[in-house]
Image (cartoon, rainbow, N blue to C red):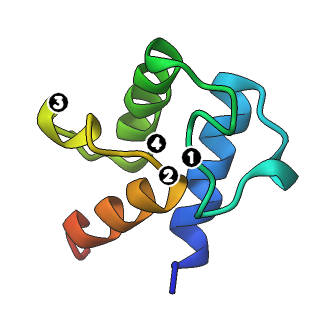
Amino acid sequence: MYQSETLAGVIEVLGAVASIDPTDVAPEKTFAELGLDSLATLEVVVAIEDRFGQLIPDDEWGRFRTVGDVVDYLESTAVAP
């Protein structure tokens, strides 16, 4: 189950950076289904790093295929306050 705060933040970034309608975003959606090419995906990843304050290593973000992949990664690597 996805924490709504993390998913909401990713959806917010997708809207701001890639102009994707939030109603089009679901955890199982691939970046290709959302219309993102590799460059746009990189821009989204950089914005997600800024939004969540987490550095995502290049070898990790290259594995992201779906929105859920990103949310899972963020939740599994988040530092507790």
Q: Which mark is residue 39?
A: none
Q: Nearer the viewer, mark 4 or mark 1?
A: 1
Check disc 3 and give the amino acid type. Asp
Q: Secondary structure at mark 2?
A: loop
Q: Which residue is mark 4?
A: 51
Q: Residue furthest top?
A: 39
Residue shown at the point (86%, 54%) measured from the top left = 23
Residue shown at the point (51%, 87%) measured from the top left = 1
Q: Which residue is mark 3?
A: 58
Q: Secondary structure at mark 4?
A: helix
Q: Is residue 37 above or below residue 60?
A: above
Determine the CA span between mark 3 and mark 4. Answer: 17 Å
Q: Is residue 43 left or right of residue 54?
A: right
Residue shown at the point (77%, 34%) measured from the top left = 20
The quarter of the image holding the C terminus is bottom left
Q: Which residue is mark 1?
A: 30
Q: Earlier in the sequence, mark 4 or mark 1?
A: 1
Q: Which mark is residue 66?
A: 2
